Amino acid sequence: MSSHVVVSRPRFDSRAVALGDEQRPPKDAESSVRENLYAGTSAGLATAGYRSAKYTQEEWFANNYATLNQAVTDYNNAEKLRHESKTLYTDTEAGTFRTQTEGTRYLGERLVDIHFWKSELEQNIKQIAAETELLLGQKRRLEKALDTTEIPFAIATDNLTCRERRFGPDLVKDQVEEELLKEVELIRSVQALLKRTLDQTANQIRANRQAKQTLELDWSDKHQAYGLDDQCGRFNNKSADTQHHPSSSKLQDQVSDPEAWVKFTQDNLRVCEQEQQASASLRLLAERVLQETSEDMRVQSANVDKAFSQRCLQLTEAKTQLELHLAKVLKQIGAQEKNIVCLQQAVYDKQAPLRVAESRLYHRAQRPNMELCRDTPQLSLLGEVEQISETVTVLQRQLCEARRSLSDLEDTRMTLEKDIHCKTHSLFIDREKCLAHRTRYPTVLALSGY
């Protein structure tokens, strides 16, 4: 290699020409600049002994060799890069196809999962809807049964009010009144129980509808997600409706993971199943309440009717006995009245003999002197007057007793007639009013809400 140093050709500086005389440097400096300005030029002999601006032959070969080497290097690098690019293209194409195929498969699996849970939701929605309809039917029965209880309550209270119009000794707290009070208390307790059951039923219906709404919202979301995933699964590289969405690859906030997604639906289904079980249990409870309350009310109604029948039988027997005694008393009154008439006649009949005896004694008392003798006729007349007087006294005493007995009989007759009237009135209330009103008592089916 040559020992010559290759330098570049000096560049002419025109700025020095533009300088004026005022700015011209000193001579020594000017001669130094001139030497530097023309140093290295090849103009004639003046450049002899200085470095030439031309390349040497060795430099040309070296430059040529370097150019060839650079070309070979660039060619090899390009060939290697092309091969690597082809390999990378093939690998990325296969990887992209594999990733896309895998994504499509995952979308298909996701669609299967969504369809499964969507089917489960649809089934449970139908079940909770059917259960709610059954519970609504039970609620209507409870409302009808509650309304129906107003009829026996009105009947029982009306019976108590009617029986308050009894008077005399019949205004008594008997077995009928006790059974009627039990019936009123039973109806009130039944109404309270039916109201509580109605409230529970209404709350359960709201809970069922809330669970159904939750499932419907979940089903709607899954239906929309199924449509979107189905649309995504149908996308391919030749689809015309695809475009770039650079921001879609970013993770969204508040997203769920598969476990949370499955747990959310399972929790909703579990709540729905719990509400269905609670609703079914409440329906059974309501059915048992309706059945037991209707049977209890009918049993109590039968007890009241039985008590009414027994009471009416007692009143009838008492009335019959009173009527028999009244008949006897009336008969005895008639006989006593006749007896009084006979006694009065007997007393009247004793007046004539007494007048006769007293007249005899009066006239004999006017006998003169020694003829005024207490002889046998005188003694006989005295005994006759005394006997008749005693007889009249006894008859009059007996007449007083007869009149007092007649007065007692009249009082007894009045008492019996009043008591018979009282029994007749009580029988009219119990038999004609109460029992007739109780024929409108609802049946077991009506009390059960049918």
Image (spheres, rainbow, N blue to C red):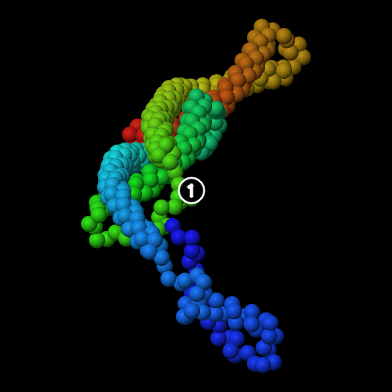
Q: Is residue 183 above or below residue 136?
A: above
What's the residue at 67%, 81% (across, down)?
Answer: 29
The residue lying toward the viewer, choosing from 380 and 301, is 301
Q: Quadrant of the C terminus?
A: top left
Q: Quadrant of the N terminus?
A: bottom left
Residue 98, percent across and down? 28, 43
The residue lying toward the viewer, choosing from 292 and 405, is 292
The residue furthest top is 376
Q: Is residue 314 visible?
A: yes
Q: Write down the quadrant of residue 63 in the picture.
A: bottom left
What's the residue at 64%, 82% (across, down)?
Answer: 31
Q: Is residue 99 above or below residue 398?
A: below
Residue 90, percent across and down? 26, 47
Q: How many marks?
A: 1
Q: Secondary structure at mark 1?
A: loop
The residue furthest left is 238
The residue furthest bottom is 21
Q: Is residue 109 left or right of residue 45?
A: left
Q: Which residue is mark 1?
A: 254
The residue lying toward the viewer, choosing from 76 and 221, is 76
The residue lying toward the viewer, choosing from 256 and 391, is 256
Residue 243, percent across and down? 32, 60
What's the residue at 55%, 27% (across, down)?
Answer: 173
Kind of residue indicated by mark 1 = Gln
Q: Is residue 259 above or below residue 373?
A: below
Pointer 1: residues within 10 angstroms few (<14), some, or many (20+)? few
Residue 342, percent across and down? 51, 22
Q: Is residue 194 visible?
A: no
What's the residue at 59%, 77% (across, down)?
Answer: 36
